[in-house]
Amino acid sequence: MVELWKTDAPRQAEFFLAHPTQIRKQARLVWHQAITKGDGKAWLYFIFGICQWFPTQHRLNKRSNCDNVEARMCLLCQAGDIEDMNHLWVCPAMAKAQLALQREIDLILRQRFPFGRYSLESRQSRTRRECLKNAKSSLQNAISESTIVRLTRDFWKANKHKACIPRRSFSLALSKLRSYPTVPEHLCSDFLSIIIEEFTLQVEGCTDVLRHSNAFEWWCSGNPNDSVFGSLGSFFVVT
Ligand SMILES: [Zn+2]
């Protein structure tokens, strides 16, 4: 068994090879407890633990409940996704832990690697900074800076998949915004988030680049100029 571990699954054998006596003792203890209390899951957790396997719902239930997909779904976020190792990295319920891990890794990389302290500007930051600079010089305060910053985010979201982002189209589209009607008051954001959740809304119809809410994943505008900023097009054509 140990030889098999070493050859077929060296990673899963690491703990046992480092602490063979302790793990044998603990195995007897857990087995005894699992039998006495009739709790088979305790034994499963122990096996997964010493093999460095995280006891995800997928791992725990893929054999015993292979027909029942629901048994393998994530219990933390309730998003309906299968809880496997890939899901743990993107599970919304684990966001805090994911950020903490990212911070720790960033710190190690910065402290221990040569030139690690030199931070390179991200593509998003560079593109948005250049767009903002160009817009400020060409528009001369015709549009407020906070609005331009918001628009650079929309522009980036709509164009980030392109190998070469056409920055001129941002300035061009921006110069046309002056002809837009005055922006009315937004709906209360709390109210909006409640109806979005209750009715599972994803698309905001009949809006434009200056009025659309960030709470929606997608938005529609009848103005062709807005497609540069991520509009899906006219609501009546899209539907
Ligand atoms: Zn989840």
Image (cartoon, rainbow, N blue to C red):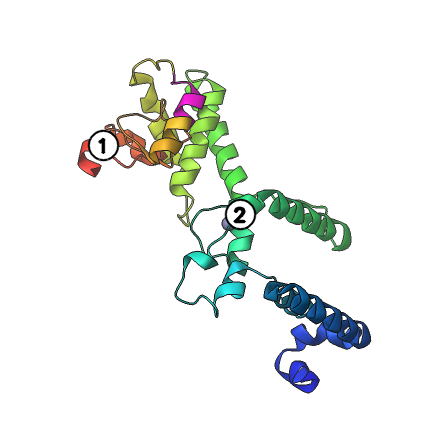
Q: What kind of residue is marked 1?
A: Phe
Q: Is residue 56 left or right of residue 234?
A: right
Residue 73, magenta (yes or no): no
Q: Viewer-proximal residue, 7 or 225?
A: 7
In the image, is residue 159 above or below residue 136?
A: below
Q: Main secondary structure of the magenta part?
A: helix
Residue 194 image offset from top left, x and y in percent: 41, 27
The answer to whether the beta carbon of the residue marked 1 is less than 8 Å from any atom of ligand 1 is: no
Q: What are the residue bounds of the magenta stretch?
A: 186-193
Depth-wise, is mark 2 or mark 1 nearer the camera? 2
User: On the picture, is 207 further left or further right than 24?
Assistant: left
Query: Residue shown at 38%/13% (left/top)?
Result: 185
- SS at circle 2: loop
Q: Of marks 2 and 1, which one's residue comes earlier in the chain?
A: 2
Q: In which quarter of the image is the C terminus?
A: top left
* Residue 77 percent coordinates (x, y): 50, 46
Q: Name the residue under label 1.
A: 235
Q: Quadrant of the N terminus?
A: bottom right
Q: Mark 2 points at which residue?
A: 76
Question: On the image, which quarter does residue 96 sit in?
Answer: top right
Q: Can residue 52 be seen in this view?
A: no
